[in-house]
Image (cartoon, rainbow, N blue to C red):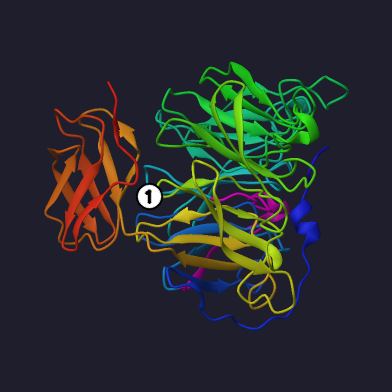
Amino acid sequence: MRLHRVFLDRACVVLLLWAATTIVSPAQTFTTQASFDYADGALPELMSLVQGTDGNFYGTTLAGGANQNSGTVFKITSGGTLTTLYNFCSETNCADGSYPYAGLVQATDGNFYGTTDGGGAHGAGTVFKITPGGPLTTLYSFCSQPLCFDGANPYAGLIQATDGNFYGTTESGGIGSGTVFEISPAGALTTLHVFAPECSQGSCTEGAYPFAPLVEATNGNFYGTTYGGGATENGTIFELTSSGALTTLYSFCTKTDCSDGSQPYGGLVQATNGVFYGTTSSGGGPSTCGTVFKMAAASALTTLRSFNCANGVNPYAGLIQGTDGNFYGTTYGGGAKVGGTVFKITAGGKLTTLYPFCEQTNCTDGSNPSGGLTQATNGDFYGTTTLGGADGLGAVFSMATGLGPFVETRPTSGKVGSAVTILGNNLTNTTGVTFNGTAATFNIVSSSEITANVPAGATTGTVEVTAPSGKLSSNVAFRVTP
């Protein structure tokens, strides 16, 4: 049941040529920003880029780099200049970690935090911190406890919760089928939940093998998926409290022909309407090409779309909600050129293929995206492909769909008086910041970053920045907490 480097095993290295910008339609422009060449990394896997407060994008590659093909951390500008910040396995016996599958999260302290699947003091993966300039600190090495009760092999990335700590999952360890953990910025780890031992018939009804990152919902609880276990051992959706109490909300493949999907490798997104949306990598009826679903309450799952392989197959990553209210994602394969797709889907289930990747020897624009998308504050979407590009080792791409610029708050909720970072573009001469109409004091840090404090009298709603280019609204409502 356990998936181990399945994507890496599929990779083949092909010498390719550079790709220029391709016009998809008058409203959409696809651009290959950079291609990996092994020396600067290779095979960016289940990784979504994160836009830093400096306006640049940060991510990881599973392989390549300077040390034993163990992966990298990289930075790339919006203009496509790629810089390697760190090469894993720089320390003896890869004590600093190896094979980072997941992406990064930029914390409130300005540093980036992430995980590696391998390496560390016990060879079972790590949690690390890296500054925007590159120095890396290993915060925790998994399998530090007897029988790896603390977990092993974290494929998923971290999230920083409203309490300031980080939360994540390990795909194995615990007592066999993975864990959910909390870790402080200083590296103190607490195992919140241990999934059942290695599954035998009916023994993993609560789920097994969490592969995706968690999401903290507006109710303060955490939601996630497992790709195994459940009523039919085809994966689950679960809810977890901060104290570790787990509730299985849904078991996949409980409908005829697995029409509700199976094996969700991606995480969930809570939309602005409070409903959760996600993908399954397979199932969806006879075609078994995967699904897009929504879940408004426990057990109330609706399949919005089943892929038919011609419009995509195997969506391994989760979705993001764009500023237009629609959802955006990728499929690893299928589509008109067989090598995967970028797609848009409405809340009602109408699916549009925005870009088809190829799976031939001239996939210089990239091929087989296994990671998700990020919408940058300029309105465009950014992502990576696992294969393709100039050297067949993956690429970074952007796609303009006509959506305009916005601002992003970090965090997206807080008390009156709490500090908030506002990320955007061309903010140097900003003249005003409001929280749902209430003026706030602010400080301009750079052209891409403003700091502000939640003003007295503020209520939940849109944050608005008055910049030289006009008024920019936040992509989600800022929630003022008691």
Quarter occupied by the C terminus: top left
Q: Magenta stretch containing residue 87, yes or no?
A: yes
Q: Position of residue 368 (x, y in %)?
A: 68, 62
Q: Residue furthest bottom?
A: 17
Q: Do we see residue 72 in this rendering?
A: no
| Residue 61 vertical position relative to residue 110 in the rendered view, above or below | below
| Residue 77 vertical position relative to residue 138 in the rendered view, above or below | below
| Residue 431 vertical position relative to residue 336 in the rendered view, above or below | above
Which quarter of the picture shows residue 43? bottom right
User: What residue is shown with label 1?
Assistant: 323
| Mark 1 secondary-structure assignment | loop
At x 65%, y 51%, the residue is 101
Name the side, left or right, on which 299 lies relative to 50.
right
Amino acid carrying mark 1 in the image: Thr
Q: Position of residue 150 (x, y in %)?
A: 67, 28
Q: Which residues are magenta?
A: 80-103
Q: Position of residue 352 (x, y in %)?
A: 55, 56
Name the side, left or right, on which 320 lies relative to 406.
right
Name the side, left or right, on which 459 lies relative to 119.
left
Name the side, left or right, on which 288 lies relative to 311.
right
Which quarter of the picture shows residue 414? top left
Q: Magenta stretch containing residue 228, yes or no?
A: no
